[in-house]
Image (cartoon, rainbow, N blue to C red):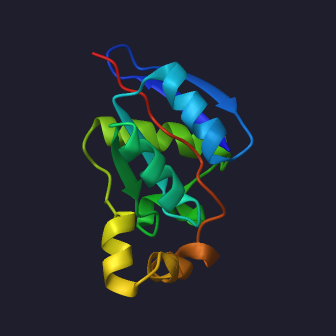
Amino acid sequence: MVYCVFETAGGEARFGRFLTSEERLRGLLARWRPDRVVAEICPLAAMVHDVACEMGIEVEIADTTQDAWQWRNVKRKTDEDDALKLARLSALGQINRVHIPSLAQADRASCDAGGRADALQESDSRVAGVRGFEVGFG
């Protein structure tokens, strides 16, 4: 997974990669202590959402089906570019959010967390993975 640490005050961005797991995500978030986590809608979005919420961090899950995310509108397409784009759009308040129900809501709605997975399955073909999160300071 690629991440972008974006400082909103100065616009400075730093990038990194880590193997995707709840434990590693928790460690990364504990180290950076972000104000907000922003991720693309994808199969990992629910895990990112749950971990960030449990740690008391604001979460935005972005709908990447809009024109700004289409290949034909982008000259260069990299995970780092996508992560930075997420961070900048979030800082400007321009993320089209996707609602991810909490585990408790998903359990009530479907008697197991599978209902939430079904809701996310539609996005599997459109998005390869979470490409970033933003850390805002200031």
Q: Total label count?
A: 0
Nearer to the camera, 60 or 69:
60
For image coordinates 45% across by 34% down, the residue present is: 134
For image coordinates 51% across by 83% down, the residue present is: 118
Nearer to the camera, 107 or 1:
107
Residue 100: tell me if it is visible.
Answer: no
132, above or below 13, in the image? below
21, above or below 55, in the image? below
Nearer to the camera, 131 or 50:
50
User: In the rendering, at what x and y percent does residue 73 appear?
Assistant: 52, 59
* Quarter occupied by the N terminus: top right
114, above or below 60, in the image? below
For image coordinates 31% across by 79% down, the residue present is: 108
* Quarter occupied by the C terminus: top left
User: In the rendering, at what x and y percent does residue 131 appear?
Assistant: 60, 48
For image coordinates 59% across by 29% down, the residue present is: 27
Q: Left or right of 99: which side holds 6? A: right
Q: Left or right of 61: which side holds 127? A: right
User: In the rendering, at what x and y percent does residue 49 appear?
Assistant: 43, 53
User: In the rendering, at what x and y percent does residue 81 appear?
Assistant: 59, 41
The image quarter containing residue 71 is bottom right
Q: Left or right of 65: which side holds 23? A: right
Q: Left or right of 91: which side holds 80? A: right
Residue 91: tell me if it is visible.
Answer: yes
